[in-house]
Image: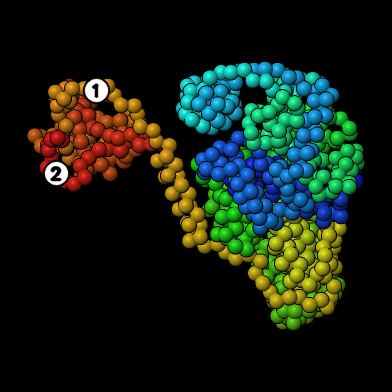
Amino acid sequence: MAKDFKRTLITTALPYTNGPVHIGHLAGVYVPADIYARYLRLCGRDVVMIGGSDEHGVPITLKARKEGVTPQDIVDRYHKLIKESFEGLGISFDIYSRTTSKIHHDTASEFFRRLYDKGEFVEKSSMQLYDPEAGQFLADRYVTGECPHCHNDRAYGDQCEACGTSLNATDLINPKSVITGATPELRETRHWFLPLDKWEPELRKWILEGHKEWKTNVYGQCKSWLDLGLQPRAVSRDLSWGVPVPVEGAEGKVLYVWFDAPIGYISNTKELLPDSWEKWWKDPETRVINFIGKDNIVFHCIVFPSMLMAYGDGFQLPDNVPANEFLNLEGDKISTSRNWAVWLHEYLADFPGKQDVLRYVLTANAPETKDNDFTWRDFQARNNNELVAILGNFVNRAVVLVHKYFGGNVPEAGELTSAETELFAEIKRIKGEVSEAIETFHFREALKLAMDMARAGNKYLQETEPWKTAKTDMARTATILNTAIQACANLAIVFEPFMPFMSEKLVKMLGEGKISWNELGNDNIIAAGSVIGTPELLFEKIDDEAIKAQTDRLETIKEQNRINSFQAAPQQPDVDFDTFMKADLRIGTVLECERVPKADKLLRFLIDDGLGKRTIVSGIAAYYKPEDLVGKQVCFIANLPPRKLRGIESQGMILSAMDADGSLVVVGPSAPVVAGAQVK
């Protein structure tokens, strides 16, 4: 437990500076880390929270090439945006730096060089794809091609985003260079590898025996990797953007981003605490916690610890790596490439002053044990039904009543009854459970318990009815409202890690100064006679119009993605004109339409073809309701030989177009024509 350590070093995954931060990043890493850091600070513990931008790697060079600017231009732009966005949401980093800083380049270079000099690397040559037109080796993301597993023809050289399978660039079918479009060649290149297999016994002991308390998803993924057997992993790449490999003869090679990036935790700590950074990394009395998403588990639990063990010199391994699963958006996987995301900087602009609403909803829906979903309707409901109706309602009632009956001065409490003692007993019980939940990284449960405290306050006011006792017993009313104000103070404390903006506003309203976790559960936080500020609403309702604006935006993005993803089928072989003219294409009017029994895909049409009536069976039942087609005009082939489908003779074929998502759209004239009109 954290109480056994003198200090806690919190690190957060370094976001790539090839785009803004979205809610998936926040729910997976940054909001949980901030909750934990704020809680420790409230408890008076010694804590440092380290963050920064990951500014190397192929995604950044791809972005720069696409925009016709330098990689430095890209990272400067997004580092500023990300840093300001985090500040806007109240993510309380002690430092938020970057991996393009000189101190990071020096630290990463020294780290590699020490391992190199100790003989910790295996140097070997391998075959890698090379673009002969660009005259350079291709990093994984510089190669696209057909996935050998699902046959998506837009797979990258490191992963297929369609099926999620990890790949090597050489696995792709018909690979192409992203730079020139040329077909790459296999050429020999030399790189340095960290022999993870060397450290496998120590990793097994450290994780599988020493950290069985880790979250199931983290422990299970680590065990899976270890059981498969670890292999050497390359720590260098053929690129010009990054930390140059500090070895003679390594021109044109840089440190692999996953070797370089976690060293950023160390370099950022050095930048923050140049004279005492080693205390935070090498003292056994320091507890190191890595907050990451599940896609980074292998790097933080296998690769980085192996690097630290290879380096030696007392570096502490992480005591816990509380990785979260993924957050989806409206039932679909968040994707930066498809713009399917809620971007933090846009949220802060669209919902000014509502930082805590997003923090609350992301924590309440935190993907702690499995992937979870963010929807705008749930966002609205949680704000209106929980933050406004429960927490905000209780605080507002308490403050308004103190102003109404005591002129804004906190009244002196008289003799407490069972109602008061039960309320404070409930607050103390919740305090213990919230502490336990936060200490064990169950932030969703901790938030639920905190809201239970607000529910208890509402229940207390409703049962004691100070608006009634004020007519007959002001002494009793004074006790009730003193108790209500003490409960408000307790809420300001318990919610501070989760909703710091609300907490600060409430503390100021109560006229209180600095708060601490130790005060939580006390029944005399606000002294009698203290002046309460003017009542202000802590939260306000979010209307349907604001939510519709967000869902409409997503619908527009979804439609654009649908269009962008469409790939026309290859053209069929040529046919001569006489053959084409043999097809008798006509327009018919649908007289009847019904589903074919026991056939999910089939509809039976009765069509007026201008010469009479004919029956046609078509496989479009999944895309239309039969009644919606009655009266419509459709294009059909009239001179196909009759064919029986489910016992029904079909006398022709209705023409449909296949859209980007595979759905079928019936083809018909743009204006009404006479039934039987031929298509020329």
Could you say where residue 286 lies in the image, as x and y percent from the top left?
A: 87, 42
Dot label at residue 673:
2
Of 482 and 418, nearer the camera is 482
Q: In terms of secondary structure, where does tag 1 sit?
A: loop
Q: Residues within 10 Å of mark 1 (few under 14, many from 20)?
A: few
Residue 17, located in which quarter of the rendered image?
A: top right
Residue 622, located in which quarter of the rendered image?
A: top left
Indicate whether 416 appears above or below 497. Answer: below
Could you say where residue 495 lies in the image, as x and y percent from the top left?
A: 74, 58
Q: Residue at x 27, y 31 (%)?
A: 618
Q: How is the image coloured?
A: rainbow
Q: Quadrant of the C terminus?
A: top left
Dot label at residue 574:
1
Whether residue 384 is visible here, answered yes or no, is no
Q: Residue at x 81, y 45 (%)?
A: 269
Q: Amino acid at mark 1?
A: Asp
Q: Amino acid at mark 2?
A: Val
Q: Residue at x 22, y 40 (%)?
A: 668
Could you say where residue 205 lies in the image, as x and y percent from the top left?
A: 83, 25
Of 86 and 455, nearer the camera is 86
- Horizontal side, residue 636 vs residue 266: left or right: left
Viewer-nearest of discs 1 and 2: 1
Indicate whether 552 appears above or below 652. Answer: below
Could you say where residue 154 lies in the image, as x and y percent from the top left?
A: 48, 30
Q: Residues within 10 Å of mark 2 (few under 14, many from 20)?
A: some
Indicate whether 331 appears above or below 642. Answer: below
